[in-house]
């Protein structure tokens, strides 16, 4: 079975999800979007209001910031697959409950297994925790490390953190982390070519 078929089956399993109470406040489930044959997967926390209305991850204010940061790192959205640890809208300022994350975790890992990225960048502590099951601070995960199945991981801050705190230094850190991801991608592609 090809990737797109596997993703469509996974989407159908979750399109009417009622595994947690987030289904009560969503307009729709916001599934991952992008290049399914990519080497770079980006995982955020949850859809914002704009994403909930449009059905596409990272198209609101945080998405515009992310696009700008990706462009600075010479990474283009069409080269990535972008998803969230939660499929449903969470009101701003509300921390995801453990049950919500647990309800979506098998889907997140199934999505990763289908896409098979070489590098995953998590945006924010909630995405980091959903992927790694750790309560470590983000700064401990900003250095590329291998996690499961040989996939590399870089944890960075969520673009919305700059919006809510007014701390533009966060944007510099995110940009630096995506530059690390770009360099790692280039190195991995070079090694692959050398092996051929």
Image (cartoon, rainbow, N blue to C red):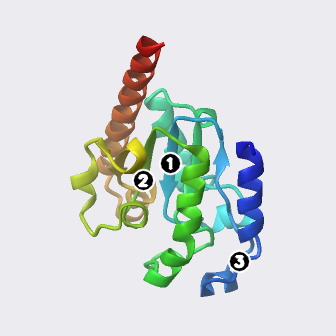
Residue 125 placed where, x, y %? 36, 64
Between the residue at mark 1 and the residue at mark 3, the CA separation in whole angstroms equals: 22 Å
Q: Residue at x 49, y 77 (%)?
A: 102
Q: Quadrant of the N terminus?
A: top right
The reply to whether residue 151 is in sight is no
Density class for disc 3 (Cα within 10 Å; few <14, some 14-19, many ≥20) is some
Residue 122: numbered disc: 2
Left or right: where 94 falls relative to 2: left
Location of residue 30 by image quarter = bottom right
Location of residue 25 by image quarter = bottom right
Asked if marks 2 and 1 touch (Cβ < 8 Å), the reply is yes
Q: Is residue 30 above or below residue 62?
A: below
Residue at the far left in the pictured view: 140
Q: Earlier in the sequence, mark 2 or mark 3?
A: 3
Q: Residue at x 61, y 87 (%)?
A: 21
Q: Residue at x 54, y 52 (%)?
A: 112
Left or right: where 163 falls relative to 34: left
Looking at the rendered structure, the secondary structure element under dot 3 is: loop
Residue 29 placed where, x, y %? 70, 68
Residue 69 placed where, x, y %? 45, 39
Between the residue at mark 2 and the residue at mark 3, the CA separation in whole angstroms equals: 23 Å
Q: Earlier in the sequence, mark 2 or mark 1?
A: 1
The reply to whether residue 44 is in sight is yes
Would you name the residue on which mark 3 appears?
17
Q: Earlier in the sequence, mark 1 or mark 3?
A: 3
Front of the two marks 1 and 3:
3
Q: Is residue 22 above or below residue 184?
A: below
Looking at the rendered structure, the secondary structure element under dot 2 is: strand
Would you name the residue on which mark 1 appears?
42
Q: Is residue 3 above or below residue 84?
A: above
How many numbered circles does the render carry?
3
Density class for disc 2 (Cα within 10 Å; few <14, some 14-19, many ≥20) is many
């Amino acid at each position: 079975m090809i990737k797109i078929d596997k993703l469509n089956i996974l989407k159908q399993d979750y399109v009417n999800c009622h595994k947690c109470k987030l289904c009560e406040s969503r307009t729709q489930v916001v599934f991952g979007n992008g290049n399914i044959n990519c080497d770079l997967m980006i995982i955020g926390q949850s859809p914002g209001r704009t994403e909930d209305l449009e059905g596409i991850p990272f198209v609101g204010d945080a998405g515009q910031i992310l696009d700008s940061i990706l462009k600075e790192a010479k990474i283009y959205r069409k080269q990535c697959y972008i998803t969230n640890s939660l499929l449903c809208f969470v009101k701003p300022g509300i921390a995801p409950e453990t049950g919500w994350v647990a309800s979506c975790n098998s889907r997140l890992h199934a999505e990763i297994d289908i896409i098979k990225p070489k590098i995953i960048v998590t945006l924010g502590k909630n995405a980091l925790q959903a992927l790694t099951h750790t309560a470590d601070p983000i700064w401990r995960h900003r250095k590329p490390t291998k996690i499961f199945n040989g996939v590399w991981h870089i944890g960075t801050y969520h673009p919305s953190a700059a919006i809510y705190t007014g701390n533009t230094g966060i944007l510099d850190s995110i940009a630096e982390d995506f530059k690390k991801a770009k360099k790692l991608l280039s190195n991995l592609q070079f090694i692959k070519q050398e092996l051929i």
